[in-house]
Amino acid sequence: MTMTCTTILLIDDDRTRVTRFDFEPGQQTGWHTHGKDYVITALTDCHMRLEEPGGTSREVTVPGGTAYARDKGVEHNVINSGETQMSFVEVELK
């Protein structure tokens, strides 16, 4: 059985959608494609396995307190591959 992370919608207005994601070890987002440009801010150290189209995956660590931006169209499944909870906030730009 696949365990899905917890999401909390914080803001959803005309300009942005802001969502908090909390993952216990092994939890994941499920496969999805980003329909908007977005920014991620890590609240904790995030040890992620990113499953990507074509069967590839890679391990990345995003240190707590850092951020990165991506363009719309990214397709992946994000999994907490660490041994502790990880949390981040995603801001989608409408």
Image: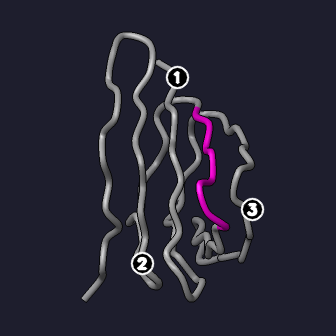
Q: Which residue is mark 1?
A: 93
Hey, what amino acid is under mark 3?
Pro
- Tell me the element at label 3: loop
Report the residue at 65% width, 74% height from top: 47
Task: Write down the quadrant of residue 82 in the picture.
Answer: bottom right
- In the depicted view, which residue is nearer to us: 14 or 76? 14
- In the depicted view, which residue is nearer to us: 55 or 76? 76
Q: Residues within 10 Å of mark 2 (few under 14, many from 20)?
A: some
Q: Give x and y (percent) for residue 51.
A: 57, 72
Report the residue at 56% width, 40% height from top: 73
Q: Marks 3 and 1: CB-CB under 8 Å?
A: no
Residue 61 is tagged as none
Q: Which residue is mark 3?
A: 63
Quadrant the N terminus occupies: bottom left
**2 or 1: tag closer to the N-terminus:** 2
Hey, what amino acid is under mark 1?
Leu
